[in-house]
Amino acid sequence: MKTITNTHPALILVDIQQGFDNITYWGGERNNPGAEANARRLLDYWRANNLPLFHIQHCSTNPNSLLAESNPGNAHKEIVKPLPGEPVIKKSVNSSFIGTDLQQQLDTANIDTVVIVGLTTEHCVSTTARMAGNFGYNTFVVADAVAAFSKTGINGEHYDAETIHLTALAMINKEFATVLNTEEVINALKKNDGFL
C-alpha cells in the first residue's frame, strides 16, 4: 500500500455543498454521516501547517439543480467553508480538472501528491481521482471523508449507499488512487514531516 511521503500534498475538497443535505433529491439514503467532520479534521490540519488546499464547487448548468449557482444549495457547507484567500475552483462536470485550471495550479506549485475528500464517492470524487491518477499525481482518497447515495440499477434493483460507496472505492483503489482513512493520512504526514 502506498503511503503519503510527500510533505506538501494538496488537499482537494470536492463539492462539500449544502445541496447535498437534501437526501431525498439524491436518492433517499446516504452513508457515512461523519464524512464532513473528517474532511474538517483534515482541513484543520492543512490550515495549521500551511499546506496547499483547493475547494471545488460544483456549479450545475441546470438551473433546477440544487447545485446551480442561483440556488442556496450551491454554497459550501459551513463546516468546511473556505476562508478568505483560499482557492475556490468552480466546475460544471464531474471532474475537478475539466474546464478548470486545477491542473495548472497544481503544476505551477510543483504539487505531485493530492488527497481527495468530499461528495460524492461514486461521482465527482471518483472522477476526480481517476483523472488525477491518469495525470500522474500520487493520488489518495480518504474513505471516511467521502460519502455516497443509494442508486437504482438498470433493471430497477436497489443498491444501498454503503454498497455504492465501497464498490466505488474498490474500483479506484490501487488502480487510480490509494484509499486511506483520515487517521492514516494525518499519521503519515506527522511521521514524514514532523508537524504537530
Image (spheres, rainbow, N blue to C red):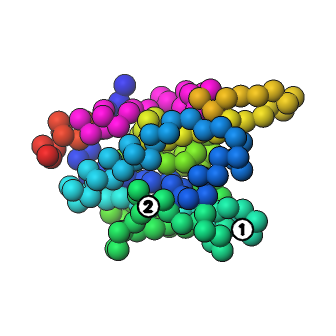
Residue nearest the observer in this picture, 119 or 2: 119
Label 2 element class: helix
Callout 2–callout 1 Cβ contact below 8 Å: no
Instruction: Give, as a three-letter code, the residue at label 1.
Output: Thr
Q: Residue at x 71, y 28 (%)?
A: 159
Q: Position of residue 128 (x, y in %)?
A: 54, 49
Name the front one of labels 2 and 1: 2
Direction from residue 196 to residue 3 in the image, left or right: right
Q: Position of residue 103 (x, y in %)?
A: 47, 60
In the picture, the disc for residue 186 is none
- Near mark 1 (Cα within 10 A), the count class, few <14, some 14-19 or many ≥20, is few
Q: Residue at x 26, y 50 (%)?
A: 45
Instruction: Give, as a three-letter code, the residue at label 2.
Output: Glu
Residue nearest the observer in this picture, 129 or 46: 46
**Residue where numbered disc 1 is placed:** 61
Q: Is residue 30 above or below residue 132?
A: above
Residue pushed farthest right?
155
**Residue where numbered disc 2 is placed:** 78
Label 1 element class: loop
Q: Give the image quarter of residue 95.
A: bottom right
Task: Please state the extent of the stretch shown in magenta in the rendering.
Answer: 163-187
Q: Is residue 126 visible?
A: no
Residue nearest the observer in this picture, 111 or 36: 36
Q: Residue at x 20, y 55 (%)?
A: 49
Quadrant (top left/top right/bottom left/bottom right) for the N terminus: top left
Q: Is residue 56 above or below residue 45?
A: below
Q: Is residue 11 magenta?
A: no
Secondary structure mostly seen in the magenta stretch:
helix
Residue nearest the observer in this picture, 63 or 125: 63
Q: Is residue 184 visible?
A: yes
